[in-house]
Amino acid sequence: PHPPQHPPQPPQPPPPPQRRGSRSRSRSGGRRSRSRSKGRGGAAAPPPAADGPVVGKYEIEDGAVKANGTATWRALVHVPRPNRGRDRPDMAPGTICIRGPSRPDKSDAQRDGEELEEAAKSGDMKVLREVQQKLTRAQQLMH
């Protein structure tokens, strides 16, 4: 007796390659290079955008809406990012946004903004963070 005959089957595509635990990296160590704009060669940092943040002055933004639908507000202040490493003359200096807690009363948020702005004038990030934490703790104690 002969084994049963099966009809010929079309050729199957090869199975996809199996992935292993680590991916191969390029010679540059796997890091993507950032594209640089052309024609800037050593130019001074570009002026801040007209619609960009005003550094050192507080603003009031809409906060999170409460579960009962009540609107809230909070203060924020943009401050220069502390330098880490070498200066980059081809890049605009970065900023950090420090936000206060959401307040149900807009005048409370404005008082927070005045405190944050005053702390920002000191130029000391540690002082600014301490004021931010003080405001947030005071808000948490009210609930």
Image (spheres, rainbow, N blue to C red):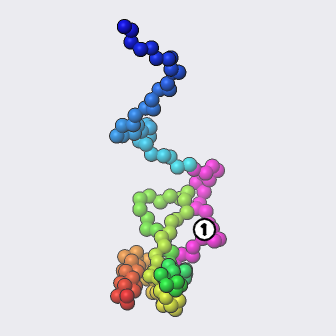
* Rendered residue at 61%/62% (across/down): 46
The 10 Å Cα crowd at callout 1, few under 14, some 14 to 19, many 20 or more, is few
Q: Residue at x 39, y 82 (%)?
A: 136
Q: Residue furthest front?
A: 1
Question: As drawn, is 11 to the left or to the right of 127?
Answer: right
Q: Residue at x 50, y 69 (%)?
A: 95
Give the residue number, with chain letter if any, for mark 1.
48
Residue drawn at (39%, 86%) of the image: 139
Q: Is residue 83 above or below residue 72?
A: above
Instruction: Give the quadrant of residue 24.
Output: top left
Q: Secondary structure at mark 1?
A: loop
53 or 64, which lies in front?
A: 64
Can residue 72 be seen from the camera position used here? no
- For this orientation, the residue located farthest to the top is 1
Prevailing secondary structure of the magenta residues: loop
Q: Give the x, y percent position of residue 114.
A: 49, 87
Question: In the rendered image, which quarter contains the N terminus?
Answer: top left
Residue range of the region highlighted in magenta in the rendering:
36-56
Picture quarter with the C terminus: bottom left
Residue 55: % across, % down: 54, 75
Occupied quadrant, residue 52: bottom right
Is residue 51 part of the magenta span, yes or no? yes
Give coordinates of residue 58: x percent, y percent: 53, 82
- The residue nearer to you, when weighing 110 against 27, is 110
Which amino acid type corresponds to the residue marked 1 in the rendered image? Answer: Pro
